[in-house]
Each structure stands twice: as C-alpha cells, then as structure tokens.
Image (cartoon, rainbow, N blue to C red):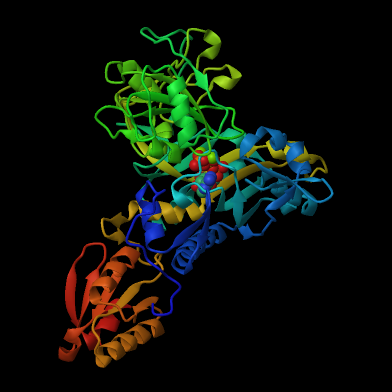
Amino acid sequence: MSSLFLRTLREDPADAEVPSHKLLVRAGYVRRVAPGGYSWLPLGLRVLRNIETVVREEMDAIGGQEIQFPALLPREPYEATGRWSEYGDALFRLKDRKGADYLLGPTHEELFALTVKGEYSSYKDYPVILYQVQTKYRDEARPRAGILRGREFVMKDSYSFDLDDEGLARSYQLHRDAYIRIFDRLGLEYVIVKATSGAMGGSASEEFLAVAETGEDTYVRSTESGYAANVEAVVTPPPAEQPVEGRPEAQVHYTPNTPTIETLVDFLNKAGLGRTFTAADTLKNVLVKTRQPGEKNWELLAVGVPGDREVDLKRLEASLEPAEVALLEETDFAANPFLVKGYIGPGALQANGVRYLVDPRIVRGTAWVTGADKADHHVVDLLCGRDFTPDGTIEAAEVREGDASPDGHGTLVAARGIEIGHIFQLGRKYTDAFEVDALGPDSKPVRITMGSYGVGVSRLVAVLAEQHHDELGLVWPRGIGPADVHVVVAGKDEAVAEGGERIAAQLSERGVRVLLDDRKATPGVKFADAELIGVPTILVVGRGLAKGVVEVKDRATGERSEIAVDEVVEQLV
Ligand code: ATP
Ligand code: MG
Ligand code: MG
Ligand code: MG
C-alpha cells in the first residue's frame, strides 16, 4: 500500500445516496468522470475482473464462445429492426466526419444475428451460443448511484441461435442455470422473477433481481407458491379512466430554463403560492415536476413532506440540475392522503434522497395528477415515478400487497430489487429482420430462433457492495474482493515490518492474494482503511510478533484470534 495508487476518503461524496456508491468512492475503488461515467482505480478494477472471471467461466461451461464487437456501430442494422428510433433518447447517436450515422451500442442483438447469418448456412452448424463482455452505452435519464446505473457500463451479453423452439427452450434453460451458478458463486441474495421483454421484443423473459431496499425494481411474490414477478409484468386489467374523487385542481407553470437558485426563486415567486421565497428558504409541501433535457416525460417530485426532511432550495437546485422544472402546486400532503399516495414514489424521491411511501400496500397504481382538463391528466406509476401519458395510454393497473396471487395460490407480498441479469426468448424478431436461415436436411430453409441474455457485470460490483457492507466499510466475499488477506504492519519496529513482509510473501507464494499495508501511518489509520477496503481477512502483525503470534480478524464477523506465526500461513491458504 506504500506504492498502491489509492487515496481513501473519510467523508462520503456529496452526490452519493446509496451505501455502495459512498463506500466504493470512499475506499478508492472508482472515481466519477461524468454523470454515469466512472473510472476504475486499481482496487475496483480487480473486483470487476474477478466478477468477469466468474461470468466467463460459467458461460464457457455451457458452451458459450466469447467474441467481441465494437461499441461504435453503424446505423443500418438498427434501422432495419426499427430500434434506431424505437430506442428513443437512451441511444447515443453520433455522426462521423462524412456525416454518416453511428450509434454506441446499448445491446447487440442486431450485430450477433448478422454475424451468424454471415458465417453459418447449414442446419448442421446449429445450435450456437456466442457472448461478449463489453462496454455498453445508454443515455439513461437518471444515471444514479454511481456504477449501479451508468451511462457507460460493462455487460456480459450472450445470444443463442437454434433451429426450433425446443432448442431455444434448452438454450434458455442453460443460461438460467448458468446465471444461478454465477450469482450463487458471487454470494448474492437474489430472486428470479417474471419480466416484460421491453425494448428487446420477444416472449418468455425472466429477471434476476438482487434483493436490495435501494433497488429501482419492485417485485411481488406469492406467500404460498413460487410465483414471483416484476410489478411491470403483473397482468391485471387496466383501470377505468376516471378522475379520482377529491382530486385537486392544479395550476401548472413551466419554466424553460435550466434551474439555478435565482430562476428557482423567481419561479416560486411567480407561481402564485401566496408568499415570497428567498434563496435561503426551505421548501415544504411543494409539488414540482422536472424533466431532463430532451426527455418527453415529466417526473414528479414531492418536496418537503411533513415528518420527513424539508428541502432547502440549494439542495433542490443541486438535485434538479440540469432538468427543466415546472411547479405544479403547493399542497398539504398530510391533509391529502390521495396526493401523498399519488405523487410520491421512490423514482421521484431518489432525487432528494428520501423515500416516502404512505400506503405501503400499494406497489403499483395510477394517479391523476393535474388539472381539470382531461388532456392534462398524467398517469403515474406510483413506484417507478414514470409518467405514461405522452401517448395517451394508461398502462398501470393497481397491484396491492395482500391481493390474490395471479396463479391462484396465496397472496402477494412486495419487495425491492436491483436487476442483475435478464434472460429472453426472443424468437424470430431479429432473424426475420435479417432473414437468418439455415438450410435444413431437406434443403429447405429453416428460420433460426434466438435468445438474448444479459448480466450487469459492472453493476454487480455495486450490488455486491450494497449487500456486503457495514458501518465501517465494505465486506467482500472471499475470492471476489481485491485481495483475500490484508496484512497490516502495526508498529514502527523493523522486525515487525520484516515479519509482515515475510508473511505476505509466503501467502502470495501459496496463491493467496495479499494486500500489504507497509505505509508509515499510525495503526489507527491502517485499521480504519482495512475495514473500509473490506478484504475478508485482516492479519495484524504487531507487538505480538516478539512472542511469536499475530492477530487474525474476520472482516465480516469481527471475530479475532491470535495465531502462532509459523501456523498462520497454513491456516489462511
Ligand atoms: P434496468 O431495468 O436496470 O434499466 P435494463 O432492463 O434496461 O436494466 P437490460 O437491457 O435487460 O437492462 O440489460 C441487461 C443487464 O444490464 C441488466 O440486467 C442490468 O444488470 C445491466 N444494466 C442495464 N442498464 C445498466 C446501466 N445503466 N448501468 C449498469 N448496468 C446496467
Ligand atoms: Mg434500462
Ligand atoms: Mg429492466
Ligand atoms: Mg432488463
């Protein structure tokens, strides 16, 4: 550590809300470069590589073959499938010097389908599974939580190509089993839930969600059967479109500007709230809607809900930038439970770091937000904070905890998770677009059927940190962290330093990955860093060395034991 490119921080970064983000920055694993763009420093890169290794081993074990595409891709294949436009604002589009259109790949179904078409022609060539571990680009509306939701991130994406539906089902099952092995080996707590197939198209689809309160996905599961589904995928009839009783009339004001404190204050003062605001004010009971540049959809923000943290304008400004802001109204949330239910969802509230949920039984629902004019109605997914109105359809139906499970067994309970993997039976959407056929035994062409399967490799670093930490720092599972043993040289004595180095060298020789703290810092500083960095075993070489003992501490349990110097290497290999 005397030469390691590492500076740990004592303070949480100002923009961090979730524990993994705070700790990975404080422990010097990653550094922010841009919204949703992070650099990997030595410790972080090691963890990322360890996760990649687990993923590669399990993909290879099901017969997957690794290849690699560029991230910079031509428009044409994505035009052919309609995704050049369907992908919307999340797609990074750019032009080369000749004016030709390019994109930065958000996922690679098109390229894999085209490549297989180019290389294979006979039914004898199939099935095949190809994968890559590659950097993906998505212009996420709300890059948040550090590497949990990046705009540049590492994904393992694989694609299966089969001659028939049975083959596809087999490839899907192979991936499902491989993902179970990957996430088990990483020591994650997760659930497998039914999912919608979203931008990919296709039919059967499941998500792997890591259980985490900070997750952006909500899932329900049955108390009795194995039924589990992302709330997005729970099939219930859409609600009748009718105004909700007691819905207030709302005034809507827009500002076209990027908010600054000054424009916010000015805006609040013009909003007709009946009082004068200054930059030093704290907001209470104010409902704001915000929108990222270029986005069609508004996001609702309930600011200053009684009983929770009130928000000063400076903080609000920081959380909104660079969004466009419109103030809806000032309203008493406490006196209007419908409003509280309807307007507040974690999606919206992540912006100011607080989660409110007044009726915890509602895991998905609709609310009408503004105005007497029907055209102005906004339908909001209560937990995703998403605004479904632009196309005028109401997609959200209410799903409550305690409802009967759709499979008829038991009732529903809800929890939150982070999507770590997603598997799809795509079918022939992409192979139809590119006419990917194999010549069958009877010389007739057979249309190939396809599956696609993703693991959020860089996201997993944060998910592991989210599930494995305590108030002192990170706590990596063995084999995944940046090292297996953290040797702390505690003391100025030359013999102690030599002892520490010797043990570290012996451990390395035996294949144990060691981090040696040989800095000229106080033991206090070294212990604090060791806890923060989170290597699973901490070995303290100090005063005891003279009596022939060292101390071994288990980072996860805090258990300490004294061990004879000549036995310690054998114990830790
Ligand atoms: P999310 O619902 O979190 O936005 P997604 O459904 O858009 O994810 P997929 O297209 O299914 O993502 O991609 C496969 C995997 O890639 C996801 O399961 C997730 O683990 C990871 N992933 C997706 N978007 C990001 C991102 N912005 N940053 C980091 N990892 C991501
Ligand atoms: Mg997404
Ligand atoms: Mg998703
Ligand atoms: Mg997904």
In-image side of 505 versus 567 (left or right): right
Look at the image and tell me in which quarter the N terminus lies: bottom left
Asked if residue 302 can be seen in this view, the reply is yes
When asked about the image quadrant of residue 192, the answer is top left
Question: Relative to the observer, which residue lies in front, 368 or 194?
Answer: 368
Residue 95 lies, with reference to residue 433, above or below; the image says: below
Based on the displayed image, in which of its 4 quarters is residue 274 positioned? Answer: top left
From where the camera sits, is residue 173 visible? Answer: no
The extreme left residue here reads: 547
Q: Residue at x 41, y 36 (%)?
A: 316
The spot of residue 118 in percent (x, y) is 79, 51
User: Is 275 or 60 nearer to us in this picture?
Assistant: 275
Task: Say left or right for 10 vs 296.
Answer: left
**Image quadrant in which the C terminus is located:** bottom left
Number of numbered discs on residues: 0
Residue 352 location in percent, x, y? 38, 37
**Where is 564 relative to 133, above or below?**
below
**Residue 266 in picture, x, y percent from top left:** 47, 27
**Does residue 233 lie above or below 78 as drawn?**
above
Residue at figure coordinates x 50%, y 62% from the top left: 40
Q: Position of residue 83 (x, y in %)?
A: 69, 36
Residues 375 and 207: in front is 375
Is 310 on the left-hand or right-hand side of 25?
A: left
Q: Nearer the viewer, residue 317 or 452?
A: 317
